[in-house]
Amino acid sequence: MKVWCEHAWLGGDELDADVLVEIEGDRFEAITTETVPTEDAERLSGITLPGLANAHSHAFQRALRGRTEAGTGSFWTWREEMYGFADRIDPDACFAIARATYGEMALAGITCVGEFHYVHHAPGGAPYEDPNEMGRAVIAAAAEAGIRITLLDACYLHGGLERFRDPDAEMWAARVDALHDTEAARIGAAIHSVRAVDPDAAAVVAEWATARPLHAHVSEQPAENERCLADHGRTPTAVLDDAGALGAHFTAVHATHLTDEDVAALGRATVCLCPTTERDLADGIGPAARLRDAGATLAVGSDSHAAIDLFEEARAVELDERLASGVRGRHRAAALLTAAAGGGHASLGWPEAGRIEAGALADLVNVPLDSVRLAGTPPEHGVAAMVFAAAAADVRHVLAGGRWIVRDGAHTGFDVSAALRESL
């Protein structure tokens, strides 16, 4: 297959023009710039990007959109509403909601998702006959939507609902051992939080995930930090570091309320920011620039799916810090696109994706410049326009692993709007 792109982002601060992309199977075979389109090449107008990676998702929470945002209270009161819904879903409902949600992600240019999965068992806590039935449901849902998935199976031992919990970390590990990587799905691990997993158990999870992605919710709320200090005399980051979790395979999600020592420690890891959820739940604004300066890789996610739009998540990393600091331009536009593409893919254990280059997985996201948001954009400002002006609604075509999953703004497999209506 050959695809000719009017302009393509190949990772720099500027776009490249007249880019011929040659694809063999699910990989890019060759990338050539300043070419003349040939008759056997499909032409894409506007700007073409690599596939985006949603590094933090709770698919079932898509059902809460528009139902909880207007509420009063805090993260903790929202959590009770979320628990009420989480305790009602079964594997069939889980599959339907996830399939529709992942379809919406495909329409937004997302070709890979990290599903931070903790709704494991039946209501009341009894395991299903297959104790991984809920996890297999979300893996199947991603396959139907045409996107890759990393199932970040979360160890959850204390608090929450009974159906979230495994008896201990060793039994969690035995359950997750029954899950296996496939061509389009990889298995990772998650420590739900230091509230839900004690330090000794966190060490078991970290050891299990030595060569796999390991994610954890970290310091999302001040109350979380206060409880951790009271229980362990250390911050959540320090507890996880002592447990052996931090390192190149580790991703801290949110990391909103950090000490200077926490920032330095997380410089060895990835930090996934989810600004639309962090705004919705009044979490605060994470210190993204400080983390980057400490050496951390940045990624973004849509978390509770108040919106599914990684352009918005990426630009909010910069814009929210502008509000907090009074300073503009802490993050280059190209660096923010990298967070939404290569940074997210690497955090999910897909380092061969998230960029347009020979040998990488063949994912393309085409954004024409004919919408009211992008009309009139000159090429020299194209990278900035993708971050600071584009929206998920501007995505026209999406190629994932060498296969078109979105054409002319519609999913090639099913009616996503209808699937959302029927599943929510």
Image: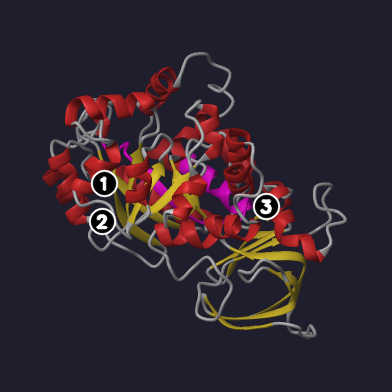
Of residue 200 and residue 401, the one placed in the foreground of this image is 200
Which residue is labeled 2 in the image?
Answer: 179
Residue 210 lies within the magenta run: no
The image quarter in which residue 209 lies: bottom left
- Asked if disc 2 and disc 1 are in contact, CB closer than 8 Å, the reply is yes
Residue 311, given in percent of the width and then of the height, sits at 63, 49
Horizontal side of 96 relative to 265 (left or right) equals right
Residue 67, given in percent of the width and then of the height, sits at 55, 22
Residue 228, given in percent of the width and then of the height, sits at 25, 29
Please give the range of residues in magenta.
97-121
Which residue is labeled 1 in the image?
Answer: 132
Horizontal side of 325 relative to 200 (left or right) equals right
Q: Earlier in the sequence, mark 2 or mark 1?
A: 1
**Real-space CA distance between mark 1 and mark 3, rounded to the nearest whole angstrom:** 38 Å
Q: Earlier in the sequence, mark 1 or mark 3?
A: 1
Compared with 398, 31 (above or below) is below
- Asked if disc 1 and disc 3 are in contact, CB closer than 8 Å, the reply is no
Q: Residue at x 80, y 65 (%)?
A: 379
Which residue is labeled 3 in the image?
Answer: 387
Q: Residue at x 73, y 64 (%)?
A: 47
- Asked if disc 3 and disc 2 are in contact, CB closer than 8 Å, the reply is no
**Real-space CA distance between mark 2 and mark 1, rounded to the nearest whole angstrom:** 8 Å
